[in-house]
Image (tube, rainbow, N blue to C red):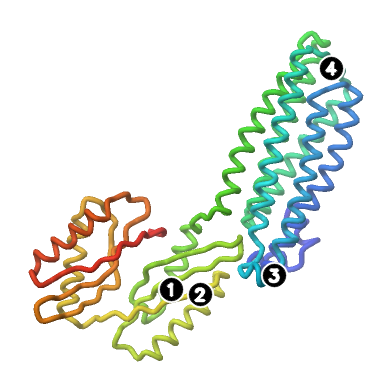
Amino acid sequence: MFILLRKIFIKDYKNINDPNVRNKHGLLASLFGIITNLLLFTFKLLIGILTLSTSIVADAINNLSDMGSSFINLFGFILSSKPADKKHPFGHQRIEYIAGLIISLLIIFLGVIMGYSSIIKVIKNEATSYNVYVFIILGVAIFVKLYQALFYGYISKLISSLSLKASAKDSFNDVISTSLVLIASLIEFFTKGKVRIDGYIGLVVSIYLLISGIKMVIETSNPLIGISLDHELVKKIQKEILSYEGVLGIHDTICHSYGPTSIYMSVHVEVDAKEDFLKSHELIDKIEHEVGNKFQIILTIHMDPVILDNQEINEMKKYLKVILDEYAIKGISFHDLRMVKGENRTNFIFDVLVPFDKKLNNDDLLKYIEEKIEQKDRKYHSIVKIDNDYYD
């Protein structure tokens, strides 16, 4: 059914990497949410008013807020698809994250309102009137909300959309809350109002909404603050770059994401220093173009010439590998080793790469390296810059 909807409304629906196709998926999911939530709100509100059920009215209001969330998603996808301009040179895709954050805040707001209404009903111990139509409406609502959750979740995974993921979570919350309302309705119906749990069920649902809303606020806020790119994607890109003949190694990979399909990456690529400069430059240009197009990223490569036939440098490379492997914290590496040879002093200049999750004292590491290099030869000295490896 999901694929059928995509086929009907989206041309070239399989080309998810195309920003326009991705945007159409978001618009389809948003419009689907607006229509289904409007129908649910209308029917639930009528039933809730007729039966004087706080939980059903609260559930109807929840569907109204869900419709508002779908509108937020709709405008989010419309605005995020705007091309880059002078004020926003990296595009507008992060608006989609803002839409997801707003939806998360709405979930929290709904939880507060529903909790307040439920407490009032518990205090007043109000009775609720139910009939068979209530159970039919609630049963249909559960089915529709489950379908919504699955549809949102399906599209969110296809296009990596946090705002639709938030909507999927919200719809799944509704499945749980409406199921609890249905259970409460059945209990009160069959006990003829002797067991009044409608308010208590509403309170449980409100707590659940608050917890899930707070979790979604954290998840949708992280991309706005700035998070690392998916490690598996980075590893695939690095492997692709290393596959080119003439590439000796890579380091200093840095990634910036300005939206699900707006990714910028820079990396240092090592090439043989003896190779013709123009040939090496041509290779770098080729990699930038081909790899960038393949993974739909903006790739910038810094070319690092590496000396391969200097015995003293090669011996130092082997020695550095040994002493860093022997250090108390594992996973440390080095790159960009250069040698500046003087009459009485030889400087080895290089960068040391420390995995980001390894906590250490930089001064201790620098002292350790300096001492070990001087032990090898009193003329040797180190000039070291410590970097963090975010994609080890």
Q: How packed is label 1: few (under 14 Cα within 10 Å), some, or many (20 or more)?
A: many
For the residue marked with disc 4, what is the amino acid? Thr
- Residue highlighted by disc 2: 291
Q: Residue at (9%, 64%) from the top-left corner?
A: 375
Q: Report helix, strand or loop for mark 3.
A: loop
Name the amino acid type tagged 1. Ile
- Name the residue type under label 3: Pro
Q: Which residue is mark 1?
A: 241
Residue found 73% across the figure and 24% down from its top: 116
Q: Is residue 231 above or below residue 248?
A: above
Q: What is the spatial separation of the Cα atoms under label 1 and label 3, in whole angstroms?
A: 29 Å
Q: Dot 4: what SS?
A: loop
Q: Which type of secondary structure does the marked residue at label 2 adopt? A: helix
Residue position for label 4: 128
Between 309 and 134, the residue placed more toward the observer is 309
The answer to whether marks 1 and 4 mark residues whose Cβ atoms lie closer than 8 Å is no
Q: Mark 3 or mark 2: which comes first in sequence?
A: 3
Q: Looking at the image, is mark 1 or mark 4 nearer the viewer?
A: 4
Residue topped by disc 3: 83
**Quadrant of res 12:** bottom right
Location of residue 302 in the rendering, given as x and y in whole percent from the top left corner: 41, 77
| Quadrant position of the C terminus in the picture | bottom left
Label located before the other in sequence (1 or 2): 1
Q: For the residues marked 3 and 4, what is the alpha-carbon distance in whole angstroms?
A: 53 Å
Front position in the image: 296 or 268: 268
Query: Label 1 vs label 2: CA separation?
Result: 7 Å
State the image coordinates of residue 177 (x, y, percent, origin top left): 72, 30
